[in-house]
Image: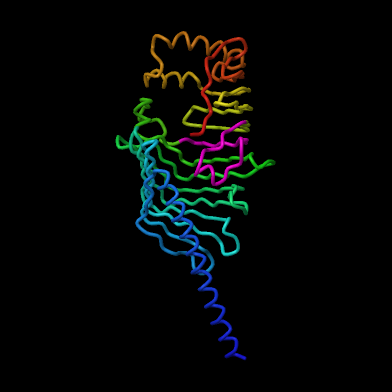
Amino acid sequence: MGRFAVKLLVIVALIWGVWWYVATGSMQSSMKGWLQERRAEGWQADTRGLTRAGFPLRIGSAVDGLTLDDPETQSSLFVPQLTLSTPIYWPGHATVRLPAEPVTLTTPQGILTLTTGGAEAALRLYPGPSLQLEAMHGNASDVTLDLVEGRLLSVKDLSTVIQQSDSPQTYDIDFVGTEFAPGSLIREALRLPDAWPDAFETLLADMTVSFDRPWDRSALEDSRPQPRAVKVDRVEAIWADLRISLTAELQVAEGGVLSGRLKVKAENWQRMLDLATASGALSPQARPQIESGITLLSGLSGSSDALDLDITIENGRMRMGFIPLGTAPRLILR
């Protein structure tokens, strides 16, 4: 009985190993096919190598030296290494991991370098050729974002959850950043005093976004789905004695034109004006007029130190009550 059991285990292990080898080979063939399709579109799409990974419980492939260069946008992405793996039972539950090596994005505007202590995104895709996104959970630690000229920002921990909601094209999005710190470039631009805290005390967002179609593989291969409705339950940022919170219900027409309502609360707004004036974003000549207007508005909201603004947007034009505020930015995903 013991010998039979050993033989059976050996046979099962051989079958398992052969099946895993074939499955990982199929994954690599799919990845090579995707790269070939990008090359057929005029991209430069290369890797230094693909190796199998994940044995025995996951089907995986480690990609070494991924380069994607889009001549149309004159942008290129270099990823030193990433690992894509799926569990044995369903390849649509994919996990992408980035090691602690810099990722470089080069655009006509400059070179952006992303470094993390490790990042992971878990994708949940529905069965089918379109690979529709059901959910994504992303986590990263010790994140830094740098330009050649200096640091843009750093974050101790990032957590993002995207979950399909009550319709295929609607997604709930939650974001939390811990110890989010603007870098030297931003601090110098704002002319912050040396005693100003390095990091935000709080930075979070909770919203629901409806798109014109669900997110699937066409978002990478063709065009991005465009937002059609945005409901912001809460966006909050606390930095030193500044506190800003926002809620919104917006509709997005063709071309990214916004309509809806936006509520903004800001505490210690005088300090914000100090920063805007020091950075040059607000001229000393214009400040008295703006400060007088905000003082009036803050008085209407019941506090001289806090703003509670209710902004209406109609066909891309913003107003607060009968006061026009100009044109709202267009919401378009490129």
Image color mode: rainbow
Q: Is residue 251 magenta?
A: no
Q: What x and y, as percent, mark residue 10?
A: 54, 82
Residue at figure coordinates x 39%, y 13% from the top left? 283
| 205 w.r.t. 19: above or below | above
Q: Is residue 201 magenta?
A: yes
290 sits left or right of 298 in the view: left
Q: What x and y, as percent, mark residue 185?
A: 34, 32
**Residue 20 or 172: which is nearer the viewer?**
20
**Residue 47 or 279: which is nearer the viewer?**
47
| 91 w.r.t. 180: above or below | below
Residue positioned most to the front: 40
Residue positioned most to the left: 149
Residue positioned most to the right: 166
**Residue 277 or 115: which is nearer the viewer?**
115
Residue at figure coordinates x 62%, y 40% from the top left? 171
Q: What x and y, as percent, mark residue 188?
A: 34, 28
Image label count: 0
Residue at figure coordinates x 58%, y 40% from the top left? 174
Residue at figure coordinates x 60%, y 47% from the top left? 132
> Picture quarter containing residue 216?
top right
Q: What x and y, as percent, mark residue 254?
A: 58, 26
Locate the N terminus by quadrant: bottom right
**Residue 296 or 13: which is nearer the viewer?**
13
**Magenta segment:** 200-228
